[in-house]
Amino acid sequence: MNYIKDQKELDGKIVLLRLDLNVPIKNGKITDETRINKILPIFKYLIEKKSKIIVISHIGRPKGKWVEDLSLNPICENLKKKLNKKIKLIKENIFNLKKENLFVNSNDEIVFLENIRFYKQEEKNDSNFSKQLASLGDLFVNDAFSCSHRAHASVSEITKFLPSYAGLQMETEISALKKVTAEIKKPITCIIGGSKISTKISVIKNLIPKFDNIIIVGGMANNILKFEGHSIGKSIQEHNCETIIDDIFKSSKNYSCSIIFPEDVVVGKRMEGDPKIKELDEIGNDDLILDIGPKTIKRIKDIIESSKTILWNGPAGYFENPHFSKGSFEIGKKIAEKNKLNEIFSVAGGGDTVALINKIGIFNSFNFVSTAGGAFLEYLEGKELPGIKALN
């Protein structure tokens, strides 16, 4: 893979820069700037090298239609302040743009194309659309690892028409994940949460031969509790996944990997209700399992204590309600504490996990935090991501 930092000649070059700036926006205000802060280094690097930058990014799923609420304008305003640079947002149809008209003023350094998903050709990986995009620049840089599991025009097909490079963030992301999956310091533990076990089954199966412990929490743990013969009341669950769970347990025995799931839980009658700690044989028909209990927290903390590498994807419960956030908070704090002592290599990934560690204020207490969800998991699963394959 070619990395942009190995490219010497950037002075005056027009760089098409693919970023993932899909940040949460409420009433026109950005509520989490993590993704923006992570790509500041590539801007500073290219500005320093005297490049001209055309940013390609998206927000949300406009499905090929122009949706004003999903404009990149709030991001441009945010970056103007952060970089102290003039930024122009081009709303004109991409098919009408010409390279020579984009940087007419010699002081112009950064232009943004409007939300690339306003064009249906983007998600179709359309070749003509990619060619038109490529005609606007001299080279292409993908610094959007979190979009690289998508075979989209501005991620994958575009590399056929321009010299293409991986950005600074992409390089950091890949080397951190390689360290977890290839240069493992044992014992290694994966804490995996989320609501659906079927979407993460391939990841779990791929990690079993490499990991010593896989801790399953969150909504997906309910399926395991049910499989083990416990009542889960009206908790979130996925149907018809008994075979999946049976496979996980069989595979884990073959590779001496421990599968850990809740020993006790915290329930509520509704999502915003009051918490009650319960043993697994005490769960009522109208109970919702919303967090892990104190015995489970202690067991997980003991496992973290004896681990050398930790991978965390997905909270332990409904952490948005403080009543059900203790499990997730305690896991996060324990990893941060071990990291401070330099006794662990830790990687966290996925949108909810990032929101959680920001909430606890321990973002900098991890060796690496990935804002990628799907791409993070697919990379761990051993899949070749279209965006990375294209750069290779």
Image (cartoon, rainbow, N blue to C red):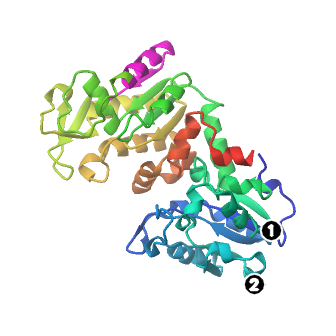
Mark 2 residue type: Asn
Tell me which corner region of the image, top left, top right, bottom left or bottom right, holds residue 89: bottom right
Spot the residue most to the bottom: 105
Considering the image in quadrants, where does the N terminus appear?
Answer: top right
Q: Is residue 4 above or below residue 350?
A: below
Q: Is residue 9 above or below residue 360?
A: below
The residue located at (84%, 70%) in the rendering is 11
Residue 341 appears in the figure:
no
Per the image, the residue denoted by label 1 is 49
**Which label is found at residue 107?**
2
Q: Position of residue 88 (x, y in %)?
A: 63, 80
The residue located at (64%, 55%) in the rendering is 155
For this rendering, which residue is in front, 277 or 248? Answer: 248
For this rendering, which residue is in front, 60 or 316? Answer: 60
Residue 91 appears in the figure:
yes
Q: Residues within 10 Å of mark 2 (few under 14, many from 20)?
A: few
Question: As drawn, is 312 to the left or to the right of 171?
Answer: left
The residue segment tinted magenta is 244-261
Q: Which label sits in the foreground, 1 or 2?
A: 2
The residue located at (49%, 15%) in the rendering is 256
The Cα atoms of the two marked residues, 1 and 2, are separated by 15 Å
Examine the structure image and report whether residue 320 is included in the region drawn in magenta: no
Q: Is residue 369 above or below residue 128?
A: above
Q: Residues within 10 Å of mark 1 (few under 14, many from 20)?
A: some
Label 1 with label 2: CB-CB less than 8 Å: no
Q: Is residue 253 above or below residue 92?
A: above
Q: Position of residue 37 (x, y in %)?
A: 57, 63
Mark 1 residue type: Lys
**Dominant secondary structure of the magenta stretch?**
helix
